[in-house]
Amino acid sequence: MMSTRFNGKRVIVTGGAQGIGAATARQFAVEGASVAIVDLNGSQAVKTAAEISNAPEVIAAGGSARGWSCDVTDEGAVHDTFTQIAGVHRGLEILVNNAGITRDNMLFKMSIADWQAVLDTNLTSAYLCSRAAQTHMVKAGYGKIVSLSSRSALGNAGQANYAAAKAGIQGLTSTLALELGRFNINVNAVAPGYIATSMTAATADRLGSTFEEHQHAAAARTPLKRVGQPEEVASVIAFLASEDASYVSGQTLYINGGAR
Ligand code: NDP
């Protein structure tokens, strides 16, 4: 078996059934990790995990993936699922807090339900999952946590809830880096710009554009003149979770094609 960056590492990727999370789960598995894909959509998580596990390059690297159904906004479900996963895998070294949703609207039309759902799914989930994961990481004296912020953390009209949650991720990240550093746990975040996934497809639909038109407009605003792909976020998450970034902690890395 070839030697890779994540041989024998145990990884949880939340919201990994599709999009950036699925690409991230695949990246870890291709580099030899055992990956738990935790998603609200349990059947899609199982399907994605099977596709990853059966890929020849994953088999060659000794990696694997398994799907788990869990609502990461539910404190009890997170505790039980993480305990079960760490039991099955006999440990947990890497957590990627990726699950997220949007419920866009201008402030005067934004309901408390949409505000709360976005805060719960994008921010509170990262607190719950990081808290559940650190138990295993502290015990092992080793861990990596990478969370999904967004370029929207800098402000984006129509996304007060999402921008607040994603800015919150940056504060959570720098604080957890301070608290967990002495246990040899690195905590970082990535802040993608426009990435072509179901999330951005749904935004296009809501605005009455085709996905192609929407991507074209986003590409025109971006110095690299194209939108990003899930794999281009996954590779940076893997870098931050690897020993290549062993002295990086408390940082948020923007992945946005050079946009200011
Ligand atoms: P997708 O919508 O494609 O994937 C998100 C996944 O999270 C889905 O599988 C979804 O399941 C799951 N999920 C949602 N709520 C929960 C929950 N409560 N518990 C468990 N899983 C849940 O999104 P992307 O891949 O585009 O986004 C991934 C992350 O990257 C998000 O945090 C997003 O905010 C962030 N991001 C994305 C950008 C983009 O341009 N795409 C830009 C910047 C940041 P289900 O389908 O069942 O809802």
Image (spheres, rainbow, N blue to C red):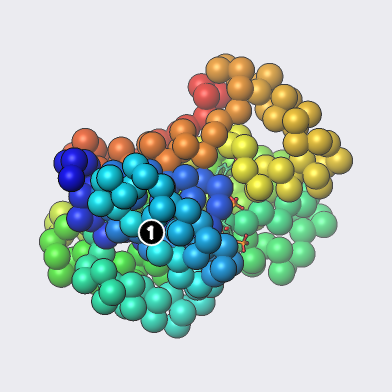
Tell me residue 181's x, y (percent): 19, 54
User: Where is 69 relative to 166, above or below?
Assistant: below
Residue 205 position by quadrant: top right
Q: Which residue is painted at 21% across and 71% down in the image?
A: 90
Residue 243 seen by the camera: no
Q: Which residue is painted at 77% across and 52% down in the image?
A: 105
User: Where is 88 relative to 247, above or below?
Assistant: below
Tell me residue 106's x, y (percent): 78, 49
Q: Which residue is painted at 68% across and 19% down in the image?
A: 220
Q: Amino acid at mark 1?
A: Ala
Residue nearer the viewer, 227 or 168: 227
Residue nearer the viewer, 112 or 39: 39
Which residue is identified by label 1? 65
User: Where is 258 relative to 246, above or below?
Assistant: above
> Furthest residue to the right?
208
Residue 137 seen by the camera: yes
Ligand 1 sits in quadrant: bottom right
Q: SS for tag 1?
A: strand
Q: Please count the marks in the image.
A: 1
Indicate the quadrant containing the N terminus: top left, top right, bottom left or bottom right: top left
Tell me residue 36's x, y (percent): 38, 63
Q: Which residue is painted at 72% across and 24% down in the image?
A: 216
Is 154 situated left or right of 216 in this image?
left
Tell me residue 192's x, y (percent): 51, 38
Indicate the quadrant containing the C terminus: top left, top right, bottom left or bottom right: top right
Residue 197 position by quadrant: top right
Q: Residues within 10 Å of mark 1 (few under 14, many from 20)?
A: many
Is 3 situated left or right of 53 in this image?
left
Residue 229 position by quadrant: top right
